[in-house]
Image (tube, helix red, strand yellow):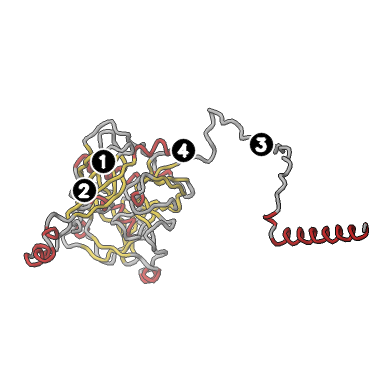
Amino acid sequence: MLHRLWLIFAQAATVCVAALFVVSTLRPEWLPVRPEAPRPPVAVPVQPAPAPSAASPRPASFHDAVGRATPSVVNIFTSKEAPQNPLLNDPIFRRFFGEQFGDGAQRTSSLGSGVIVSAAGYILTNHHVVEAADEIEVALPDGKKLLAKVVGNDPETDLAVLRVNADKLPAISFGVSEELRVGDVVLAIGNPFGVGQTVTSGIVSALGRSGLHINTFENFIQTDAAINPGNSGGALVDARGNLVGINTAIYSRSGGSMGIGFAIPVSTAKMVLEQIVRAGAVTRGWIGVEVQEITPALAESFRMPDARGAIIAGVLRGGPADKAGVKPGDVLTAVNGVAVLDPPGMLNLVAALQPGSNARMQLRRQAQSLEVSVTVGRRPKQQLRE
């Protein structure tokens, strides 16, 4: 009898162990979970950051520069009436498609940026931002909106001066663009894509960029600080928050920033600003010639030691250069003692001359050097695009 009871117990235990094995293997969630005993907390030693000193600014931060410059950068909203399709005024068209198609003027809008350069309400921006605009609205960083009017523009540098009816505005401080060096840190401030005021950082990639066929007069600062649509007319500032350029163009295959942006130097912007405020327009020198670049092949044919200078390709009859004896085929090598490196450089040198003054032009004619005195004329005003 005892042997039989032991056998039954052994068989029952074996069945239970087998059942437990099957359940734990196939359905472990059916088994009760034993709570783990709490582990004692482990302290991990960390090194706290040293307390910032009031005398030293945070490293690698341009917060102070941004704080000085951003109050002076504004958003510019423009609108203009678009030409209406004559079909919309056709009575038959309006009858079938509804009167609403012919009512009201069609308007287009655009957006850009600007920089407050005077507490009296003067604002610098790009000419293409406000070109042909019927209405211009300026939004200050604090959200206040003001109507603006165009004081004057200069399409040949793509600059325009606006004015709003306000005073005690936060004017930006002007830096010295001639002191910029390739590799210096710069910040671009504007309103890209209308998302709101934005700051991007980069370095000066190159100086004196020309020959890009963006403007008539080109002397661009090139930067890799992100500049996108809507940044036009905004500020390019140095690491101290001083204005060094007006953002104006980008090189892009996609419409967005590709790390190549261009800004007009503040020295050019200041000259344009002062002349527009004083006289309503920009006055430049002009001598009435057409020039072309000297290629290595032309330099060899002209028996020149290098390709520096500008070939006089044409002379306006009765113009200042014609009266001074300049002839087609002459090579202009210097203006008032300043060497001419290429046609854009020659254009900038002549434009800086005061109309009515006499300028010394160094020429090379048939392998001989000569100097002529030219009475500088006034550069004709460029015709605005329709």
Query: Dot 2 lies on which element?
Result: loop
Which residue was labeled with disc 1? 274
Residue 37, picture quadrant: top right
Q: Nearer the viewer, residue 330 or 171?
A: 171
Going from N to C along the chain, the mark reached first, 4 or 3, is: 3
Query: Dot 1 lies on which element?
Result: helix
110 horizontally vs 179: left or right: left
Mark 2 or 1: the one toward you: 1
Going from N to C along the chain, the mark reached first, 2 or 1, is: 1
Query: Tag 2: residue type?
Result: Pro
Q: Position of residue 93 (x, y in %)?
A: 10, 66
Which residue was labeled with disc 3? 47
Could you say which disc has been placed on residue 63 in the image? 4
Q: Is residue 128 at all visible to an observer of this figure?
A: yes
Residue, x 80% and y 58% (percent of image)? 17
Q: Position of residue 169 (x, y in %)?
A: 29, 33
Q: As displayed, is residue 13 above or below residue 150? A: below
Residue 24, picture quadrant: bottom right
Going from N to C along the chain, the mark reached first, 1 or 3, is: 3
Going from N to C along the chain, the mark reached first, 1 or 4, is: 4
How far is the residue under mark 1 from the one under mark 4?
Answer: 31 Å
Q: Is residue 351 at all visible to an observer of this figure?
A: no
Mark 4 or 3: the one toward you: 3
How far is the residue under mark 4 from the one under mark 2?
Answer: 45 Å
Query: Tag 1: residue type?
Result: Glu
Going from N to C along the chain, the mark reached first, 2 or 3, is: 3
How far is the residue under mark 2 from the one under mark 1?
Answer: 17 Å
